[in-house]
Amino acid sequence: MLDLEVNENMEFDDRAFESDLESLLQQAPDDADRDLAAKHAPVIYFDEREPFLPLTVGYMIFRKDGGSPSFPREIRLAEPGVPAASLAIEYAIWWDWDIGHLYELEHAWIFLDAGGNVVRVDASWHGSYHSAVRGGFSLTRDGRVALFAQPGKHALAFRPEEFARIRPYGDMECEERAGAGGVWETPLFKGRLPKHPLSDTLVHGYLEEMRFEPTWRFTKEFRITRDILVPWPLLEKWIPHRVELWIDRLEAETPPDKRRTLRIAHRGASDWATENTMQAFEEAAHEHADMVELDVHLTRDGVPVVIHDFSLKRLTGAEKEVSDVTLQEIRQLKVMGSEPIPTLQDVFEWARANMMGVYVELKGKGTDAAVAELVESNGMERYVIVGSFDEGLVKEFKHRMPEVYTSILFHEVDVDPLDMASKAEADFVHPCWENEGPRPDLLLSQEWVERVHTSGLGVIAWHEERPEVIRGLYNLGVDGICSNRPDLLYEVR
């Protein structure tokens, strides 16, 4: 667990959490539908090292076809090639924690025929769901459907072997990438949860301390009993308050110098490899970076490519600007005579495979639209921050993709960061003060950072390679630090 400061609120907070859950469960009706849901509730098997078990389960009975109120799907009692069901029971299973983010809501659907026999089972799987009929799922000795939860992430399978194809990613999520998702916000709870940079920072730190190495042996049994079942509308109403309780607690118990700051590799690990190249990004991943920062320009044919300067001369020797050449021509150039210039698409594909975040700096007209298109087509909305020194570009991008975090970069010291963020409609402020003397961290103050956080914004610091300055930034509780040496960000902490 986190090395949290012990204070008088600890006992109060524990009681508050217990009371909060009890108040929900006490509202559940004593009726036949709850009995029915309890009778057919599945048994879930967890990894023997699993740190998080469900707290409560919302249920809903479908006696005719209809839309699920808690999952993006239609419930159909009759499907081609499958025995027809008389009713379906939807179980919305609640965890306070997933190893990647604050709160988890997974689903199981049990389809019963007129005799009360299970004819089909559906189970949620990473935002979608899959189905099994008799022979495709197993039953416990007392006739309950058996499901298996992915370690840490809790996607539901009918047999443990189903996890084999995602095991490498599952291991990474439970260990190196624990907590990277911050507060999880789905369309169901859009705008109803405390989702902002500081809440993500607090969640990241808590879950990093909870990381574990899965065994993929499912020996821990969890039974959904009648006493934890509540109708879905009650659970839905309760969830936002539950998330707020956690954020309030983490903020109270985690002082600024104990918070988990994003380690952002500036143009990749650019002290060890040529800037903005795939080699620099690979090196950053090896050196425990959470994100890679990069710069994007558009080619003449409108393709976002990763290079810092408007001109190609410094890095490739070509006497042209990026906007003057096509992608095909870019492909023929080499950075420092060896490395190709990657496209943003190249980086996004690599980032998804390596579970890395990407901090994109927009560098010219049209980059807002082109980058937004690639973020959406690659499903990177939760894994990028998009920023610029150009207020207009940041604002235009935010209008295109309001769900994506944005940042406004600036060199000036004597400016109001909140005013700058407001004009750009940004989520982060990013002072670029690396050249402001030997200790630029002293230009920031605890009050400055707290004022930004109180406004619901985050702070990303300039690229920094001086250990004493990095330490000073950590002590202030900034949300991210860039560095050409991500290894230092890891070692100094």
Image (cartoon, rainbow, N blue to C red):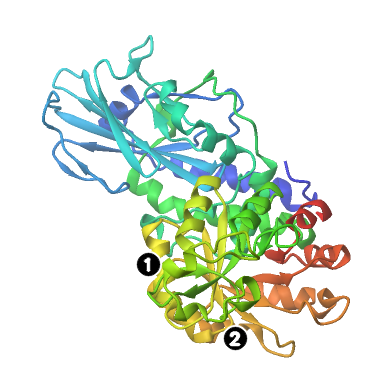
Q: Read off the residue under disc 2.
A: 420
Which residue lies at the image location 36% right of the left edge and 59% below the top edge? 377
Question: Quick one: 145 or 35, which is closer to the camera?
Answer: 145
414 relative to 155 in the view: left or right = right
3 relative to 116 in the view: left or right = right
75 relative to 206 in the view: left or right = left
Question: Quick one: 84 or 37, which is closer to the camera?
Answer: 84
Q: Identify the image quadrant of the C terminus.
A: bottom right
Q: CA distance from mark 1 to mark 2?
A: 26 Å
Q: Does residue 95 appear anywhere in the picture?
A: yes
Label 1 or label 2, whichever lies nearer to me, is 1
Q: Earlier in the sequence, mark 1 or mark 2?
A: 1
- Residue 119 drawn at (x, y percent): 20, 21
Give above or below for 447 relative to 192. below
Instruction: Please identify the quarter of the rendering in which residue 461 is found.
Output: bottom right
Question: Quick one: 395 or 281, which is closer to the camera?
Answer: 281
Disc 1, disc 2: CB below 8 Å?
Answer: no
Q: Amino acid at mark 2?
A: Met
Give above or below for 289 relative to 389. above
Q: Seen from this angle, which residue lies furthest top? A: 141
**Mark 2: few, some, or many residues within 10 Å (few <14, many ≥20)?**
some
Q: Read off the residue under disc 1.
A: 373
134 relative to 378 in the view: left or right = left
Q: Look at the numbered disc 2 and give the secondary structure of its residue.
A: helix
**Mark 1: few, some, or many residues within 10 Å (few <14, many ≥20)?**
few
- Residue 217 drawn at (x, y percent): 54, 19
- Residue 187 drawn at (x, y percent): 37, 58
Q: Amino acid at mark 1?
A: Glu
Give above or below for 490 relative to 413. above
